[in-house]
Amino acid sequence: MKFFLAPMQGLTGYIVRNAFHHHFDYIDKYYTPFIPAAKRMNAKIKRDIDPVNNDGITLIPQAMSIVADEVIDLHRQLAPYGYDEINVNLGCPSGTVVSKKRGSGILAYPDMLDSFLDELYTKADFPVSIKTRVGFNDDELWPELIEIYSKYPISELTVHPRVQKDFYKNTPRLDDFALAVQKINPDKTILCYNRDITDTGSFKALTDRFPDIDEIMVGRGLFANPALIAELTGVRMDKAELRERLKNWHDEILSGYLSIFSGEKDAIFRMKEIWAYMHGLFPDSEKLWKKIKKCQTLNDYQSIVRMAFDAF
């Protein structure tokens, strides 16, 4: 079984990727947060994809576009950095994205999707993988969408079995994923499952139903428990080891953020994004989370976190 870290805008940049790689090295592949392919890569994106900042990490750049030539041009920009594959985001549910028919917005227009993929796979001389949802307002079009995907030499198809309207709520539509398992030719396209793997129980339920699935992408579950993949693969660590790894993981991320942001408030804000998921690992988690949300200075933040790890 291979495990991937899902791209999460604002969360899975190179600082976080390196922290996982150094302290919870169970992730086989990482994806960048989406890159707007219609624009030239700016300094921030170049820093994020720079191989120097991703040493030892298998990283796939993700493009946000529904224009084949934009994806081709992004590949030209990325090639000097050593990247030979692009993942296309057809799953983002953000309103500002879908209003332009990008991300999961294109899923409401099967003919447009088909035309985009036809041009893209005709022109691309490099592997193109895709991350998708199963529809827009509902999943009525999913049978048509999966037939379209099955036509093309998609190197890897990651299916998040929710529709745009679900955002990140509601139960994953596993019958829709089952249709993908049925329709996608494994000799042509590798199928990857994404979403709601949070513990050994949810992992077992998925693999019991889909025993042939060999790739799983995890996002929020890994921020709620950075040791999740270790647990899923049978790696055992006592509480003292887990505490030490978590603290080192946290401290590396904080140090990285403090080094790239001009003010400590920006670094604290980013750390709060992580604690929104991770606080559940700690005693009195809701009380801890309230304290972290309220803190405004680095000294206050570090004091709260120190006490949290002491009580772990």
Image (cartoon, rainbow, N blue to C red):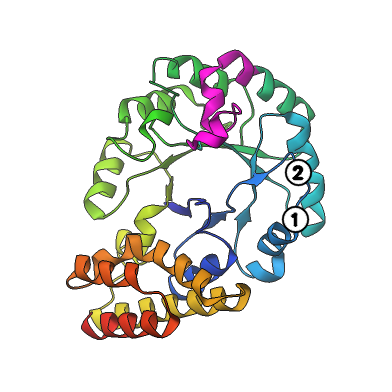
Q: Is residue 69 left or right of residue 206?
A: right
Q: Is residue 166 left or right of residue 114?
A: left
Q: Tell me the quarter of the picture where residue 55 sits.
A: bottom right
Q: Check disc 2 and report its element: helix, strand or loop.
A: loop
Q: Check disc 1 and report its element: helix, strand or loop.
A: loop
Residue at 43%, 76% in the rendered image: 249
Residue at 39%, 29% in the rendered image: 165
Residue 228 location, x and y as percent? 33, 62
* Magenta highlight on residue 167: no
Q: Tell me the quarter of the picture where residue 117 sits.
A: top right
Q: Nearer the viewer, residue 267 or 176?
A: 267
Quadrant into which the C terminus falls: bottom left
Residue 28 location, x and y as percent? 51, 58
Residue at 52%, 59% in the rendered image: 12
* Residue stretch rendered in magenta on the structure: 93-114
What type of secondary structure mainly makes up the magenta span?
helix
Spatial CA span between label 1 and label 2: 8 Å
* Magenta highlight on residue 109: yes
Q: Is residue 222 left or right of residue 106?
A: left
Q: Nearer the viewer, residue 29 or 141?
A: 141
Residue 286 location, x and y as percent? 21, 65
- Residue 152's disc is none
Furthest toward the left, the residue is 284
Task: Give the residue pinned by disc 2.
Answer: 39
- Residue 225 in sight: no
Task: Give the residue pinned by disc 1.
Answer: 42
Pointers 1 and 2 in contact (C-beta within 8 Å): yes
